Amino acid sequence: MLMNGRDMLGVANENSFAVPAFNISDWAMCRGVFDISEELGAPLIVAIHPDEVAHIGRELLPAIIERAHRSPVPVVIHWDHGGTYEQALQAIQYGFTSAMIDASLLPFEENVAITKRVVDAAHAVGLSVEGELGTIGKLDEQAEAGVAASDIIYTDPAQAVEYVERTGLDSLAVAIGTAHGLYPKGLKPELKLDLLQEIKTLLPIPLVLHGGSGNPDDEIGRSVKLGINKINISSDIKVAYHDAMREVLADTTLREPLVIQPPSLAAMKEVAAHKIQLFDAAGKADLY
């Protein structure tokens, strides 16, 4: 069942759970996140970054859209971290049902202006829009290009209220202490949950957490109960997928994807299942 992000996250917000947004980079990964979400009865956001769209090709989007229509669980196809108005128009053209405009590295007034322009265009054709205020950290060079600063700039609660009121966006990605990529040894991730509470009190719309890979489960679980309704998961599932693939490919005689990929997908689905349970999303498809 294909829907937009506003409708999906509205239910999550009312019922205090978070929908996982799994970033996929190939068709096998896409099928894997569909399969595990359906097994657990969880709503699903298929997140695809512009770099990932360039990798898989826009020709794959109709297949993902068809798979979403056939799914018994609600599905959103989300353009992740679009950086320009023109990219938002691409998301509309390609059939996405949700689009993020990430102008968080720009000055506040410029962020407001481009976000409002994207909201006006997207809402006119039924897409929901996610914006970002504050900046998510970036831990390694493989993290999504062009979407993060080297340091975290925490979201200002009062400014967040103004940003949402002036743009009309549907959900807000907040900076409360996460970072894109994998945390190096010796660096302890820590969320500012008091800041999250303050933002949610002032702004009771769905809130989004980016860079959730590597944060302690107890912190992530508490963030869900305090108002996070969408959590992006990219590095964690990709590490599981490709680490398992490296183990399989240690046997250099293997060549058939039907032999190579199933163990990789099983490892990825195990991680994805853990996230679905952690976000309290299992079984929540019945609410739609």
Image (cartoon, rainbow, N blue to C red):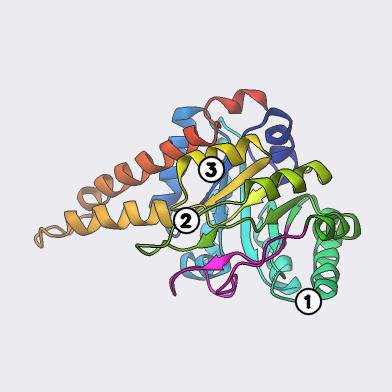
* Nearest the eye: 278 or 152: 152
Residue at position x 33%, y 51% in the image: 240
Of pointers 2 and 1, the one earlier in the residue sequence: 1
Under tag 2, what secondary structure?
loop
| Amino acid type at mark 1 | Pro
Tell me where residue 211 appears, x and y as whole percent.
53, 57
Residue 141: x and y in percent read 44, 75
Residue 5 lies in what quarter of the image?
top right
First to last magenta residue range: 131-156
Q: CA distance from mark 2 to mark 3?
A: 15 Å
Which residue is disc 2 drawn over? 234
**Is residue 27 depicted above or below 103 in this figure?**
above
Of callouts 3 and 1, which one flags the residue occurring earlier in the amino acid sequence? 1
Q: CA distance from mark 2 to mark 1?
A: 27 Å
Q: Is residue 253 visible?
A: yes
Give the label on residue 84, or none.
none
